[in-house]
Image (spheres, coloured by chain):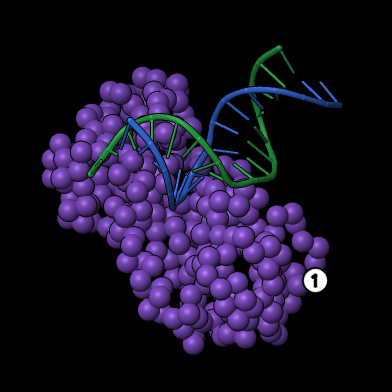
Chain colours: A purple, B green, C blue
Amino acid sequence: MPELPEVETVRRTLTPHLVGRVIDTARLRRCDFVTGKATPAALLQGATIDRLERRGKQLAVIARDGRAVIVQLGMSGQVLVARAGAALPTHVHAVWTLKGAQTAILFRDPRRFGGLTTLGSADELARVWESLGPDALTTNGGELWNAIRTSARAIKPALLDQRTVAGVGNIYADEALFESGVHPKAICRRLSRPRVERLARAIREVLARAVEARGSSLRDYRDADGQEGAYAALHRVYGRGGLPCHSCGRPLQKLTVGQRTTVCCPRCQSR
DNA sequence: CTGGATGCCTGGGAGC
DNA sequence: TGCTCCCAGGCATCCA
């Protein structure tokens, strides 16, 4: 579910609850969603939280001693701040308690496409993040051009590939392609440099506006404080197949690109 | 290097 | 009310 704006909103809402605090206990209620060591220590028990960083859709909770946990929300994942000792909602797979605070941090993920990765050092985190492309919120035309200019794939699956640019998912790919007038099936290497520049700008702007609106809530998504995001009401194409294009008024087309539902305007977006 | 199919999961909505 | 089917924000893997 969550794409970059939702993960960034979780990062921002979670930060004041975690930074500077000491993890009292870290408990797993199942362990098949953890990559790496699944011990309390690997899950930061006893550690002091230094900072929360995001790259693309990955959120890293980093301790002062270098230990880190990467949180990936998958389709339905949530990180929630709860009252310590309160009854747990369904599908909570990990619970952290904090020293000197009446709060618990929950990892909840009904579909379990998400997960945690435990890491022992900042180096390990850097190595994992090397496999991701540049962060989509701050990418530029040059980076995008280098990533796609020789590729024979369609642009939409290229954008969804986290090695091209990190953080774009199905919603914001459609929104950015519409905004820049690029058809989702346009072949990467046939796009001109100016069009790639325009696309990169659209990616940044769409994502920045979505972060400002605290993300898109379709069904599952909530930030760490349980709040919904407001950006879904501002989608111009995603979820609007058959409805009039905001630009030309003709019906938006729903199609499948790279096995993902895609909505675009056949008139305003060209290949 | 491509695209396509499949699998991993649960839950919500549509249609009967 | 209850059943079946389809769909969903992600991602890895296998095959042609």
Left or right for A32, reference A191: right
**Quadrant of the image occupied by residue A158:** top left
Q: Nearer the viewer, residue A265 or A64?
A: A64
Q: Chain letter for mark 1, please.
A: A
Q: Position of residue A29 (x, y in %)?
A: 71, 64
Q: Which residue occupies 63% across, 54% down?
A: A109
Q: Which residue is mark 1?
A: A85
Q: Is residue A195 visible?
A: no
Q: Which residue occupies 56% across, 85% down?
A: A48
Q: Is residue A140 visible?
A: yes
User: SS of the residue at dot 1?
Assistant: loop
Relative to A21, residue A204 above or below: above
In the image, what residue type sits under mark 1?
Gly
Q: Which residue occupies 36% across, 46% down?
A: A160
Q: Nearer the viewer, residue A208 or A95?
A: A95
Q: Which residue occupies 34% across, 60% down?
A: A132
Q: Position of residue A60 (x, y in %)?
A: 48, 70
Left or right for A212, reference A202: right
Q: Residues within 10 Å of mark 1 (few under 14, many from 20)?
A: few
Q: Nearer the viewer, residue A99 or A69?
A: A69
